[in-house]
Image (cartoon, rainbow, N blue to C red):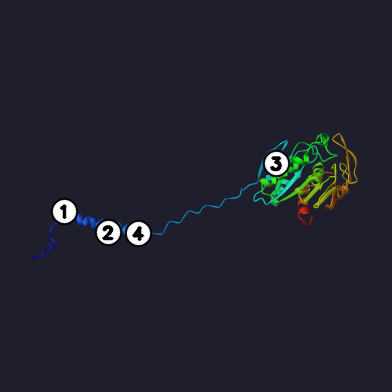
Amino acid sequence: MARRRWNASRRPDGKDRRLWSGLLLAILLLVAVSAASAAPAAPARAVPPAQADPTPRDEVIPLLGGRLMIHIPVDAGPTGVVALHSFGHTPVEQVEQGWSAAADRHRFVVIYPDRGLSWNAGLCCGDAAASRRDDVSWMASAIILARDKYHLSKIYLVGFSNGGMMVERLLAERPGLSSAFAVWGAAPEMPTAGRWAGEGFLFNGSLDLIVPMKGGIVSFRGITTTVRPTGETKIWLAGAHLCDITIRGGGHAPPVNWPEMAWKALRHEPL
């Protein structure tokens, strides 16, 4: 049989062209697949971590018969401070005393209960006491609500004057709400004594004539009230570990550094 010789000068016919086109296509596909498999995978885009709120914020929580004003600092910790205002005032008084600023410095959440111009601490004060309004149950509900909402593991109570009296009554009747308190210019005005095993700091000005340390009958804003001696808190809060702190020359109004003094006392830091 005669062999067919390849003639390099011969022009390819249609069958040859189809053969070469198929071969070329196969080679190109092989090169593309190899390149794709050899190329490094594109790095996944990193998801930025959630950022903490860069500024302090204030919130208001309506509560039957009143409301809660909350100040949350940047990177707030698990401690809450419930700050109660005096007779004839609103939570603005506590803000002006510096409690929100102290919260920003020490990273605690400050809770300002607001239910009018007075608290029913028992013998004192104003319309709340005259109407025998149940501030104990309302306050307990408010504290539990704030504690759960802001994931607080520790609650301190602080108060000035009528607010401090309310703190003492609250712990006599709801001892599980807090393990420590600090009050300025207050007295034990609760209607019934209680037992509480926590720690309390009783700040007073030696020249206080509104809530005198020795007690007595006083008139404030046209209302006459019986004030018990401040030293009797140990009788009305049996079992409490109390520390009396008298500021010589001080009056009824707390000093400008009152929030800092209270915080240090609650944290067992030098005053």
Residue 112 location, quadrant:
top right
C-beta proximity under 8 Å, tags 2 and 1: no
How many angstroms separate mark 3 from mark 4 (CA)?
64 Å
How many angstroms separate mark 3 from mark 2 (CA)?
75 Å
Amino acid type assigned to the residue bearing label 2 in the image = Ile
Mark nearer the N terminus (2 vs 1): 1
Quarter occupied by the C terminus = bottom right
User: Judging from the image, what secondary structure is the residue with disc 1 in?
Assistant: helix
Which residue is the site of mark 2? 27
Label 4 Cα crowd, 10 Å radius (few <14 / some 14-19 / many 20+): few
C-beta proximity under 8 Å, tags 4 and 1: no
Disc number for residue 14? 1
Label 3 Cα crowd, 10 Å radius (few <14 / some 14-19 / many 20+): some
C-beta proximity under 8 Å, tags 3 and 2: no
Mark nearer the N terminus (3 vs 2): 2
Quarter occupied by the N terminus = bottom left
User: Judging from the image, what secondary structure is the residue with disc 2 in?
Assistant: helix
Q: Position of residue 38 (x, y in %)?
A: 37, 61
Mark nearer the N terminus (4 vs 1): 1
Disc number for residue 35? 4
How many angstroms separate mark 4 from mark 1 (CA)?
32 Å
Which residue is the site of mark 3? 69
